[in-house]
Image (tube, rainbow, N blue to C red):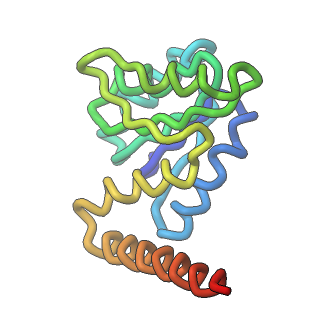
Amino acid sequence: MATVEIVMGSKSDFDVALPAINILKEFGVDFGVHVLSAHRTPVEVTELASSAEKNGTKVFIAIAGKAAHLAGFIAANTFLPVIGLPAKSSFMDGMDSLLSTVMMPNGVPVATVAVGGGLNAGLLAIQMLALSDVALKNKLKAYKAKIHDDVIESNKEIKF
């Protein structure tokens, strides 16, 4: 298993996963990608989540739309941190996915990023890993300095 496991409820969620995949690649973080459903493949999701810690996984990113129970289902089956990434669906512009992901019962926490917020899901996983990885922390500091500098440069370009 990989350090970060990305689990999508459907292959149609791949576009939402891609920014997380790209930032994890940029930072050199090992990851795996799976299509598994809390509703259609519950045994497989349970096996992945319950065996993750002993197999070296540190963080999950769970992507789902509509009745987005995947993140909570994974969180119920592991002690590892789970980042819920709601996918925009054809209903309610993704609000249904957001509410399904963020409304977890006490004792089953899921960190949730914005609807379609794949980049932030990847960065949040990196921040979690950087707590115990100095090299990763230094890469993250350099990344944050670059995005800071990009905004400052944009500000200079917009002046009249």
**Foreground of the two, 116 or 6:** 116
Residue 130: give x, y in percent of width and height.
30, 63
Residue 4 left/right relative to 119: left
Residue 17 left/right relative to 52: right
Q: Dividing the image into 4 quarters, which one contains the C terminus?
A: bottom right
Residue 120: give x, y in percent of width and height.
50, 52
Residue in the image at 66% along x and 52% along y: 18
Compared to 55, does 106 lie above or below? Answer: above
Compared to 38, does 118 lie above or below? Answer: below
Residue 57: give x, y in percent of width and height.
37, 45
Residue in the image at 52% along x and 61% along y: 24
**Foreground of the two, 30 or 112:** 112
Residue in the image at 50% along x and 74% along y: 147
**Foreground of the two, 68 or 1:** 68
Number of marks in the rendered image: 0
**Foreground of the two, 154 or 82:** 154
Q: Quadrant of residue 41?
A: top right
Compared to 15, does 73 lie above or below? Answer: above
Residue 41 left/right relative to 105: right
Residue in the image at 55% along x and 62% along y: 23
